[in-house]
Amino acid sequence: MDKKKNDTFKRLWAPWRMEYIRNPGKEGESGCVFCKKPVRDSDKEDLILYRGKKVYVIMNLYPYNNGHIMVVPYRHLSDYCEMSPEERHEIADVTAICIEVLGRVMYPNGFNVGFNLGRSAGAGIDDHIHQHIVPRWDGDTNFMPILGHTKVVVDGLKETWKDLKKEFDKYGEQ
């Protein structure tokens, strides 16, 4: 295959990414993103879906899959063992809500649920603990990541937020 044809396979149209290109530095700001976002009054812009007493739910800005969300304690800490019993219990309870909501809205065949504790464990933000909930579908791992080193996310973040937010609102803020 010549170079020109090979380059064609490396480009995907993703117009929703333009928002991040037009706002340089927004995600590179100093301070903890997980501490800053919940104190602002812009849940739609910040992709916050649910607010509990000790934790909140936010969409992953760089998702592994459609519907990739995270449960995050409001309190800034990086060590799982430093969480209070109330924080650990609420993370578990809110995780169940997340799985129910994702199931009703996106109909996944399964989920990856867990923490990446520390940078060497894969944490992109390792100074503020957070749990990932990633919906998975039969056949969602295909040739694109293997051959093209590209993950296809089929729906925009704002569209997914809107669909999920309607369901999370049924639970109300705690």
Image (cartoon, rainbow, N blue to C red):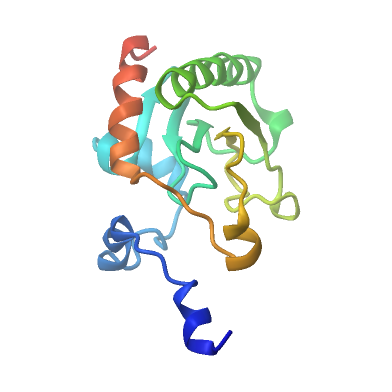
Q: Nearer the viewer, residue 165 or 39?
A: 165
Q: Residue at x 69, y 37 (%)?
A: 79
Residue 7 appears in the rendering: yes
The tally of labels here is 0
Q: Residue at x 70, y 32 (%)?
A: 80
Report x, y in % for residue 168: 36, 19
On the rendered structure, is 129 left or right of 49?
right
On the rendered structure, is 97 left or right of 130?
left
Q: Residue at x 59, y 53 (%)?
A: 124
Determine which quarter of the picture holds residue 13: bottom left
Residue 40 appears in the rendering: no
Q: Is residue 12 above or below residue 44?
A: below
Report x, y in % for residue 57: 44, 29
On the rendered structure, is 54 left or right of 117?
left
Report x, y in % for residue 115: 67, 36
The C terminus lies in quadrant: top left
Determine which quarter of the picture holds residue 133: top right
Q: Nearer the viewer, residue 143 or 24?
A: 143
Q: Residue at x 65, y 26 (%)?
A: 83
Q: Is residue 65 above or below residue 94?
A: below
